[in-house]
Amino acid sequence: MFFSKKLKKLNVSHCFFSRNSGFSKGIYRSLNCGIGSNDNKKLVHKNIKFVESFLKIKKNKLKLMYQTHSSKILKINHKNLKKKKFKSDGITSDLKGVALGVLTADCVPILMYDKINKKICVLHAGWKGIFKGIVEKGIKKFSKNNLNSLIVAIGPCIGKKSYEVDKFLKLKFLRQSKYYKKFFKPLKKGKFLFDLRSMVNYKLKKPE
């Protein structure tokens, strides 16, 4: 389990869970909370219940997504609060007592918190979502006047030494910006190591 020092200091209940402490077995042996997976549904719900219990989340107040590597971000309000799962790769809310969850393996989990308006947003950011602008869209869900009060925490994700991509993915990003070249390290002919985390950091910090 991992925590953000800044969010802990603000007493914001959160956690980046690892694969440990889960009840799933076999190839899913982990804390698998993916309802859409082929894992045993009873064990998946048991994993989710563990998360809810650890964070002291009330029943049906943990909102998860059906993630498709899009840049779609949905707002949870009183009208859709009873929905069990949202088809998006980002969800945001300012409702008290509502917890937002994001499921990742290699992709980047991002937590955003506006400490003035008490608004939260979570993002599932793989290369497809990042390419489509999900990080920038997440920031735009918050008031420009309060961006200085925005706390962002990035969770565990695939490391730059492990993420091998081909030249076509690199060229795809370079067509957006030549600056992105710094996030691709030559490995062998036609192959590169992609620093996904550093690209997310750049997009969070770059000026409009």
Image: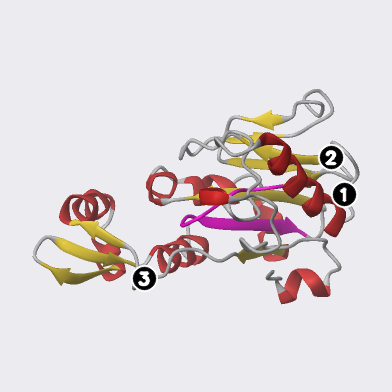
**Residue 68 position (above or below residue 199):** above
Q: Residue at x 57, y 56 (%)?
A: 109
Between 27 and 122, the one lying in front of the other is 27
Type of the residue with mark 1: Ile
From the viewer's perspective, tell me whether residue 95 is left or right of residue 162.
right
From the viewer's perspective, tell me whether residue 83 is left or right of residue 106.
right
Q: Which residue has dot 1 on it? A: 57
Q: Are marks 1 and 2 in contact (CB under 8 Å)?
A: yes
Secondary structure type for disc 1: loop
Residue 88 covered by magenta stretch: no
Residue at the farthest front position:
26
Q: Position of residue 89 (x, y in %)?
A: 55, 40
Disc marking residue 61: 2
Type of the residue with mark 2: Lys
Q: Quadrant of residue 162?
A: bottom left
Type of the residue with mark 3: Lys
Residue at the farthest top position:
79
Q: Which residue has dot 3 on it? A: 160
Q: Position of residue 3 (x, y in %)?
A: 71, 71
Q: Earlier in the sequence, mark 3 or mark 2?
A: 2
Q: Earlier in the sequence, mark 3 or mark 1?
A: 1
Q: Residue at x 68, y 39 (%)?
A: 64
Residue 110 covered by magenta stretch: yes
Tell me if I can see residue 55 in this picture.
Answer: no
Q: Residues within 10 Å of mark 2 (few under 14, many from 20)?
A: some
Q: Quadrant of residue 59?
A: top right
Residue interval drawn in magenta: 101-114
